Image (cartoon, rainbow, N blue to C red):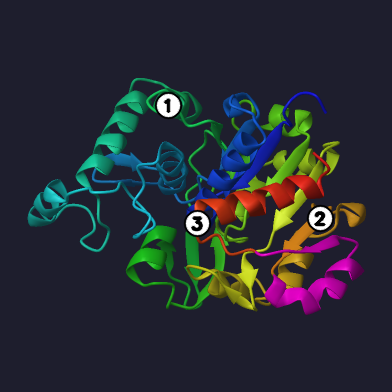
Amino acid sequence: MTRPPRVVVLAGGVGGSKFVLGVRGALRARGDDDTASALTVVVNTGDDLWLSGVRLQPDVDSVTYALAGVNDSERGWGRRGDSERVNHELQQWGAGWPWFTLGDLDLGTHLARTGWLREGLTPTAVLERMSHRWDLGARLLPMTDAEVDTIVELEDGARLHFQEWWTRHRATLPPAGFHNPGIDRAAPAPGVLEAIAAADVVLLAPSNPVVSIGPILAVPGIRDALTRTPARVVGVSPIIGGKVVRGMADVCLTAIGVETSAAAVAAHYGARGAGGLLDVWLIAEEDEAAAGDVAGLGIRPLVTPLWMTDAARSAALAETALGAADV
C-alpha cells in the first residue's frame, strides 16, 4: 500500500482516548505526517447530557483534549490545570449537580458548543469547528447528530441518566438495562458510513462494550456498515487478566448477561463470518488461555501486551492492531 492506510476507530471514554492517541502515534511513526486525512474517529455520544443550560459531550471532549495534549491524564477527564471557580459558584446557587465537577476551561468548551448549537449548527459541524483550534491529527465524528443520552434502568424500576448512575453512585445501584431513547430513529452522523465503507481497517477501541461502543453500534446503519465493509475489523479487549482496566464495565457487562472475560466480550461482538463484527480480537498476555475459545468463535485471536501505560506502549498496541489487518 503506497498511501497511508485509511483507519476508522470506534471509541469512547478514557481507554478509547488513549488508544486513539496510540493509533495517531503509530501512523506518525510510519512517516505519515498528515494523519488527519488517514484517521477518522467515530466517538460515542451516548454519555452526552444537558446540565446548567449547556450541552456536555464527555467522550467527545475526552478524545479531543487527549489529541490536543491538554487533557488531565491523572483524573482521566477534563483539562489539565483547570480551576473550578465557576463550578463552586454554580453550587452556591444550587444549580447543576454538586457531585459533577465542571472545570472553568471545560465550561468554556461547553459554552462555545452550546452557543453554536443554538445558532443552528449540528453536533457534527460543531465538532469540526472545535477541531480547528488544535492540530488533532484526526477527523472526529460524533456517532450521530441526534440526542440519544443513555438512561440506566435500575432493578427497582427507577431510571437515571447514565452520568448520575456512573459519577454520583459509582455504578453501585444494580442496573437492569441501558437505554438510549430515540436511537432507533437516529441516523449516523454525516461521513460515518462513508468512512467505514472506504476504510482499510476498522478498529474497536478497548472502550466499555456496553455504554461506549454499544451506543455507536445501536445507531441504525452503523452495525450493517461494519458487516459490509471490505476492511478487516480488529477489536482490542478491554479486559486484562479477567478484570476491567478502568471504570465499571464489569457491572455493565453483568447487567446484559456477559461474563467479564476476554472471550466473553469477543462473543458479545461476534465473528463477522457468523453475522457479528470481528475478524481479529487482540487479547492480553494475561488472557492467553482464552485464545482457543476466541478462535472457536471464528475470530482470529492475537495475544499481545494491552497495557497502555505510556505513549510508546499505546502506539505499539495500535501498530499491532494495524498489522493484524495487514495495513
Residue 35 image-quadrant placement: top right
Chain-order first, disc 2 or disc 1: 1
Q: Position of residue 118 (x, y in %)?
A: 33, 25
Is 218 positioned to the left or the right of 97 in the image?
A: right
Residue at 46% across, 47% down:
59
Distance from disc 3 to disc 1, alpha carbons, whole Å, reads 30 Å
Mark in the foreground, 2 or 1: 2
Chain-order first, disc 3 or disc 1: 1
Residue 243 image-quadrant placement: bottom right
Q: Residues within 10 Å of mark 2 (few under 14, many from 20)?
A: many
Quarter holding the N terminus? top right
Residue at 73% across, 34% down:
196
Residue at 76% across, 51% down:
234
Residue topped by disc 2: 280
Is 88 positioned to the left or the right of 206 in the image?
A: left
Q: Which mark is residue 126?
A: 1
Mark in the foreground, 3 or 1: 3
- Give the residue type at disc 3: Asp
- Boundaries of the magenta span: 285-305
- Give the residue type at disc 2: Val
- Give the residue type at disc 1: Val
Nearer-the-camera pick, 146 or 254: 254
Q: Position of residue 31 (x, y in %)?
A: 64, 30
Chain-order first, disc 3 or disc 2: 2
Distance from disc 2 to disc 1, alpha carbons, whole Å, reads 34 Å
Residue topped by disc 3: 310
Tag 3–tag 1 contact (CB < 8 Å): no
